[in-house]
Image (spheres, rainbow, N blue to C red):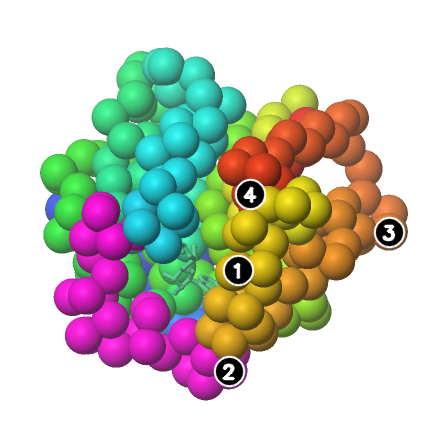
Amino acid sequence: MKPCSTTIPRIFPPVYPASASQPPPAIPDYLQKVYWWAYLHPNAVRLFERQWLVNLILWGNFARLRDATLAELGKSIEQKVLQVACVYGDFTQRIAARLSGPGQLDVIDVAPIQLDNLRAKLAPDARVHLHQQDSSALHFPDASFNSTLLFFLLHEQPEKVRRATLAEALRVTRPGGKIVIVDYHLPQAGNPFRYIMKGVLKLLEPFALDLWRHEIASFLPADASFANLDKTTAFGGLYQKVVITR
Ligand SMILES: C[S@@+](CC[C@H](N)C(=O)[O-])C[C@H]1O[C@@H](n2cnc3c(N)ncnc32)[C@H](O)[C@@H]1O
């Protein structure tokens, strides 16, 4: 079993003990330069950690998209789930509430402030483990998880990081397991959000329009091996859910 870099211990017992041989990952450049105001600054966490605001940012679709992701895991989660990156609102709490029997949830994020914020939102639960890791270089062994979730992460990442994140998600998910991706998508012609969101994303999220121009499948490794890929869209095409069965 490989040790992980830094694990947030105490109430949440670590799966992998912190190791001096693996220092915590550096905060990626794009997070520091583009998204500091959303995820890294203490005021960002204070401002955005509001369910209604996250819902407003998603034009009222937060619960619908969250529940579509949860539905892929089933009502009772008796498997090992990896959530790649923290999410404002009650996304993780809802997953944790469905854990039963041998069910276990691991959450990684590269930003300690996000892990601290998540820890404060969660009830102490020995089945939930938080780790400081970079999505593009996970420390989990191959085939560690039954399901891996990527909720609105890929659009924030430059293409090289996005490709590495997807490759890592495939690597750590067991054959037969699922990778569930929810993110932005090119809205249908005639959807007014096609014009509104183009401006918003261009201004605030410089890598996001990649997901309008290209299918998520196009960012998978050329030699990716998986059994099935199913894409559905919502809200006139503005959002997509891609489920890859390994
Ligand atoms: C999942 S995304 C956005 C989710 C959604 N917009 C929300 O409401 O929170 C935001 C998270 O991704 C994390 N993140 C971004 N790049 C990362 C990376 N390379 N590795 C791990 N976490 C990353 C950020 O620190 C942040 O906590």
Q: Is residue 171 visible?
A: no
Can you give x and y, in whole percent of width and height, for residue 184 in the image? 57, 50
SS under mark 3: loop
First in sequence, mark 3 or 4: give its number: 3
Tell me if 113 is positioned left or right of 28 in this view.
left
Report the mark closest to the observer, 1 or 4: 1
Badge 1, how many Cα within 10 Å: few under 14, some, many 20+?
some
Badge 3, how many Cα within 10 Å: few under 14, some, many 20+?
few
Report the mark closest to the observer, 2 or 1: 1
Q: Which residue is mark 3?
A: 222
SS under mark 4: strand
Quarter the C terminus occupies: top right
First in sequence, mark 3 or 1: give its number: 1
Q: Which residue is mark 2?
A: 29
Q: Is residue 35 visible?
A: yes
Report the mark closest to the observer, 3 or 4: 4
Q: Nearer the viewer, residue 240 or 76?
A: 240
CA gap, disc 1 and disc 4: 11 Å
Can you give x and y, in whole percent of width and height, for residue 49 in the image? 21, 56
Residue range highlighted in magenta? 27-54
Q: Which residue is mark 4?
A: 239
Query: Is the residue 224 above or below the residue 195 in the image?
Result: above
First in sequence, mark 2 or 1: give its number: 2
Q: Which residue is mark 1?
A: 197
The residue shown at (78%, 26%) is: 227
Can you give x and y, in whole percent of width and height, for residue 238 in the image? 57, 45
Q: Using the rendered view, name the quadrant where residue 202 is placed.
A: bottom right
The residue shown at (64%, 30%) is: 232
